[in-house]
Image (tube, rainbow, N blue to C red):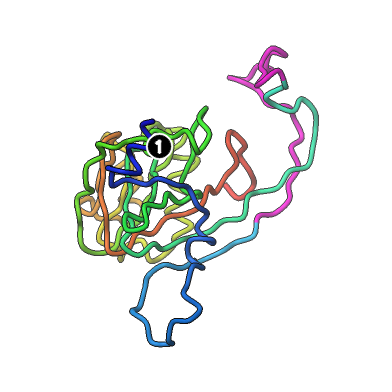
């Protein structure tokens, strides 16, 4: 019911779509001359194969056999071959971001971009943002923003494993954006890391669970690493 009400009366996203599918939507009958857009894939790197030699451990100890998910083992207990995910850098024209999970969506079409979605337990079609008829309008900020926001990015582990690699993947253009979006709260150790990468502190926007912004151009990445699975790229 809430999702139906959101579709009728809300302004937030109502569906989930992959970036490639969303970006390729064009009118085949349209003339060549069209307004220029900033929606495209800026960069792509193919993930490589690697070997996991030891079973997963928790704080240095083997995981209990009872660590399961839907009655299946959560982690593989023996050596196996795996692959890094392919890595993408995306640009979304008039894009918006909501919350400290870094959910990216297109307000005009009310489309949530699949590659920005990550949740510990909920499937994509059950995200609260899809059932939020009272979601307020995003605060509009002019210019270019880059999002390093990720699920759990407020803590050191996910900041180091996911947020910083996103910035490094973005590369030398990080210093040219108007806003760097980062999981809050603001801490000295986070500021030191960003200063080390040449980021000016006054460009940082600290993102909380209720943060809601839109930009002329929003740049973000796909998930660069597999959940709880460090790889040689890091």
Residue 73: x and y, percent? 72, 22
Question: What residue occupies the far bottom of the structure in this picture?
Answer: 32
Residue drawn at x 40%, y 37% is: 153
Compared to residue 86, the image places residue 9 above or below, namely above
Q: Which residues are drawn in magenta?
A: 47-71
User: Which residue is labeled 1 in the image?
Assistant: 153
Residue 201 colored in magenta in the image: no
Q: Specify the quadrant that holds the N terminus.
A: top left
The part of the image, by quadrant, that contains residue 32 is bottom left
Count the marks: 1
Compared to residue 36, the image places residue 73 above or below, namely above
The part of the image, by quadrant, that contains residue 174 is bottom left
Question: In the visual, does 163 lie left or right of 53?
Answer: left
Residue drawn at x 70%, y 26% is: 75
Question: In the visual, does 24 lie left or right of 201?
Answer: right
176 vs 90, nearest the viewer: 90
Q: Residues within 10 Å of mark 1 (few under 14, many from 20)?
A: many
Compared to residue 198, the image places residue 224 above or below, namely above
Residue 182: x and y, percent? 33, 44
Residue 144: x and y, percent? 29, 63
Residue drawn at x 24%, y 36% is: 134
The part of the image, by quadrant, that contains residue 128 is top left
Of helix, strand and loop, which mostly describes the magenta segment? Answer: loop
Residue 68 colored in magenta in the image: yes
Where disc 1 sits, the SS reads: loop
Residue drawn at x 73%, y 50% is: 49
Residue 72: x and y, percent? 72, 21
């Amino acid at each position: 019911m809430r999702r139906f009400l959101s579709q009728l009366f809300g302004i937030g996203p109502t569906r989930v779509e992959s970036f490639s599918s969303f970006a390729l939507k064009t009118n085949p009958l349209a003339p060549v001359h069209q307004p220029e857009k900033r929606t495209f894939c800026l960069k792509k790197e193919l993930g490589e194969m690697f070997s996991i030699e030891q079973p997963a451990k928790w704080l240095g100890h083997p995981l209990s056999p009872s660590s399961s998910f839907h009655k299946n083992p959560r982690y593989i207990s023996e050596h196996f071959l795996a692959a890094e995910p392919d890595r993408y850098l995306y640009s979304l024209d008039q894009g918006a971001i909501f919350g400290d999970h870094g959910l990216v969506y297109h307000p005009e079409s009310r489309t949530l971009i699949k590659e920005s979605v990550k949740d510990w337990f909920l499937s994509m079609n059950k995200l609260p943002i899809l059932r939020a008829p009272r979601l307020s309008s995003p605060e509009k900020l002019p210019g270019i923003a880059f999002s390093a926001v990720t699920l759990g990015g407020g803590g050191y582990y996910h900041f180091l494993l996911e947020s910083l690699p996103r910035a490094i993947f973005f590369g030398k253009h990080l210093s040219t954006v108007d806003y760097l979006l980062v999981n809050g709260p603001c801490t000295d150790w986070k500021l030191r890391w960003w200063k080390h990468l040449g980021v000016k502190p006054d460009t940082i926007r600290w993102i909380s669970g209720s943060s809601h912004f839109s930009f002329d151009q929003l740049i973000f990445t796909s998930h660069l690493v597999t959940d709880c699975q460090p790889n040689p790229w890091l």
